[in-house]
Amino acid sequence: MEQIESTVVQNLHAIEELNENDVELSPQINLKEPDLDDPILKWAERNIAEDPNNKIELIEELKDMIFERGECEPHRMDDAFLLRFLRARHFIVRMAHRLMVNYYTFRETNPTYFSNIDYSKLLELGEAEIFTVPPYVDQNGRRLLYFRIENWNTSQFTTDELFQAIIFLINAAILEPKHQILGGICIIDVNNLGAGHAWYLTPKIAKSMVAVGYSSLPHRIEAVHIVNGSKLFDYAFGLLKPLLPEYVRQKIIIHSDLDSLHKWVLPKYLPKRYGGIHKDYRYNEWLSTVSNNEDLLEEIESYGYTGGKDFLKSL
């Protein structure tokens, strides 16, 4: 994986001297496209084939393909919406089109993930600290999402509710052009994985995980880092692994210790529990901070989250 400025961490000895003030906290989602002189566009040109000289032409080509093939009926056809699918598939139009077809098929076949959302349940999930979105990005500018499986009480939260929450968070992140370009990082903490959790690692759940993570939403997860493994996790993952496509398996990195994780994500951009410098953040704090962005609220509603605007404004 190419990083924006550096690759593997060379020196981790200064961690004791760091504190949270050394990292800019930027919880606000910036919905504006990068300026033409922003270095991120140079990175985009090198890594996802985003060329300002033919971007509009490729958007039009995607529009034509949608109309000609008629495999889906997008609820939006504006350039900004279509651009998300192109960025997620390195501006290969046929692949962006397939992603869009997958997206609408996934929505139709899994309506419980997208409709009749119990927003109070989303807040409960945030309070339980099952998912966390910190108000900072990693050393490459990528958003971070943490999933702590030990905090998942299977009798309190269903798998449908977990998927509702994570899809809601992803859909919010997708609105940010920098996230569309750079992708995101997921860190899954399987500490205290129990038999009750492992029971849910079924083919159906595996299929939904692949759809949400890679095949059916217009975003890119650049890596999935798994920490605090155990023999039970090794056994459960051994059953799940054959169900995952090879391109997904290549994104999963299982770490034997925190030093291994630090080769991919600098301690400066991690919470203390993973050898970093930050406190733990609840995603409710992040949602509350971004709730004053009127454009974001309108976009959330456009994704079909009826009541989402009022929900966020109430935080």
Image (cartoon, rainbow, N blue to C red):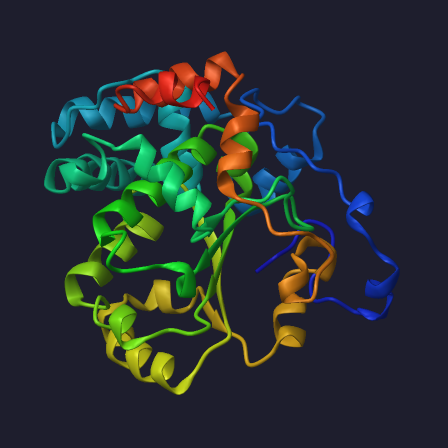
Q: Between residue 81 and residue 312, name the one nearer to us.
A: 312
Relative height, residue 71 to residue 4 (above, below): above
Tell me if 2 is positioned left or right of 213 in this view: right
Q: Residue at x 26, y 33 (%)?
A: 118
Residue 39 position within the rendered picture, expressed as x and y whole percent measured from the top left: 70, 35
Residue 313 position within the rendered picture, expressed as x and y whole percent measured from the top left: 45, 17
Tell me if 274 is positioned left or right of 96 in this view: right
Relative height, residue 307 to residue 203 (above, below): above
Using the rendered view, name the quadrant where residue 36 is placed.
top right
Question: Where, quadrant-wise, is the N terminus in this rendering?
Answer: bottom right
Relative height, residue 172 to residue 200 (above, below): above
Residue furthest bottom as drawn: 231
Q: Is residue 152 visible?
A: yes
Using the rendered view, name the quadrant where residue 234 is placed.
bottom left
Q: Between residue 213 and residue 162, name the one nearer to us.
A: 162
Q: Residue at x 13, y 30 (%)?
A: 69
Residue 134 position within the rendered picture, expressed as x and y whole percent measured from the top left: 59, 44
Residue 210 position within the rendered picture, expressed as x and y whole percent measured from the top left: 28, 56
Q: Between residue 231 and residue 110, name the one nearer to us.
A: 231
Q: Is residue 50 visible?
A: no
Q: Residue at x 28, y 56 (%)?
A: 209
Q: Residue at x 53, y 17 (%)?
A: 293
Tally the marks. Answer: 0
Relative height, residue 141 to residue 86 (above, below): below
Tell me if 104 is positioned left or right of 282 in this view: left
